[in-house]
Image: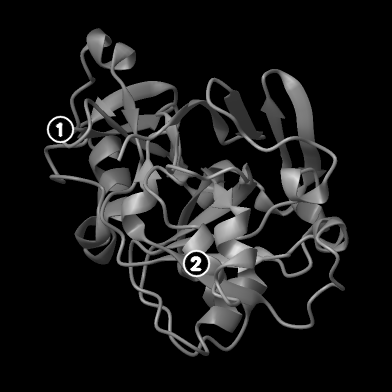
Amino acid sequence: MRFLRLGEPGAERPYVRAHGVLHELAPIAADIDPAFFASDGIERTRRAIAAGALPVADAAAESLRIGPPVVRPAAVICIGQNYAAHAAESGSAPPEHPILFFKHPNTLVGPHDDILLPPGAERVDWEVELAVVIGRRARYLANDEEAAACIAGFAVSDDVSERAYQLDVSGGQWSKGKCAETFNPFGPELVTPDEVEHGALRLASWVNGEPRQDSSTADMIFGVEALIRDLSQYMVLEPGDIVNTGTPQGVALSGRFPYLADGDTVRVAIEGLGEQRSSVRRATA
């Protein structure tokens, strides 16, 4: 199943795509939020589809704006330097343990919404990432099997970053460079684990049509299940929480490419999960 939210910002409605058919999700859920996941929303949706209880969406729904497929997560948890080549282009050795930082949940926007450059920001970067959405509470998980059981699904994420805020003026507090408005285009869909083999997905990015990143999740230093298991030792992951699992090489921080500028177009894509296309413009104070 593939979950999505369609409509203008703040007025999105929940939908689910199953066997290629778009269905209204409203009969069983007001939205795709932490309460949906905590109430076993994925399985309830599966049963409702099997029973024919979800109406087929009006054809006009397909033309609506796509919002982020998950709303109001309690946390957006991010992993740094989780691909060896990206660590190297950042001037660092591969980490021995996952590097952890946070994004503010209000950074989430739709997959085709604008990316806003903060006033004065000059080093804004793109980062295509596989995102994991937590489906059930995860605490002190013992193994990868328990971690896998806590995953609701996967989505495309762009961990937009302002590198000067992250590295030069933060005193090591990476989140300062990660939390500006619009700094996490997310979606288009939340894809359940049975629909995708997440261990070897191609992920790529382009700026103004020119290739930037091109890699595979097989190159992760810490795999998805290992990350969820590790995180659960240090915090309780709640239903609806999002984990951005890191980005491969090919970002502007490497010095190989210019940073984003007003008027640029960023495209990021992950095999089987869809793609995003965002226009970049300068925010007004």
Q: Which mark is residue 110?
A: none
Single out the residue that lies furthest toward the front.
120
Nearer to me, 204 or 13: 204
Marks 1 and 2, how far apart at CA:
28 Å
Q: Residue 274, how many percent across, how many down?
A: 56, 30
Residue found 19% across the figure and 45% down from its top: 31
Which of pointers 1 and 2 indicates the residue nearer the eye? 2
Residue at image point 71% right, 66% down: 223
Q: Residue at x 18, y 25 (%)?
A: 55
Residue 97 percent across, percent down from the top left: 72, 82
The image shows residue 245 at horizontal and vertical percentages of 61, 60
Looking at the image, residue 153 sits to the left or right of residue 49; the answer is right
220 shown above or below 16? below
Pick whichever, 118 or 48, lies toward us.
Answer: 118
Badge 2 density bin: few <14, some 14–19, many ≥20, Cα 10 Å: many
Give the side of residue 125 with respect to residue 87, left or right: left
* Residue at position x 57%, y 89% in the image: 142
- Residue 284, by quadrant, is top left
Point out which mark residue 11 bears.
Answer: 1
Disc 2 marks a residue whose amino acid type is Ser
Q: Secondary structure at mark 1?
A: loop
Q: How many marks?
A: 2
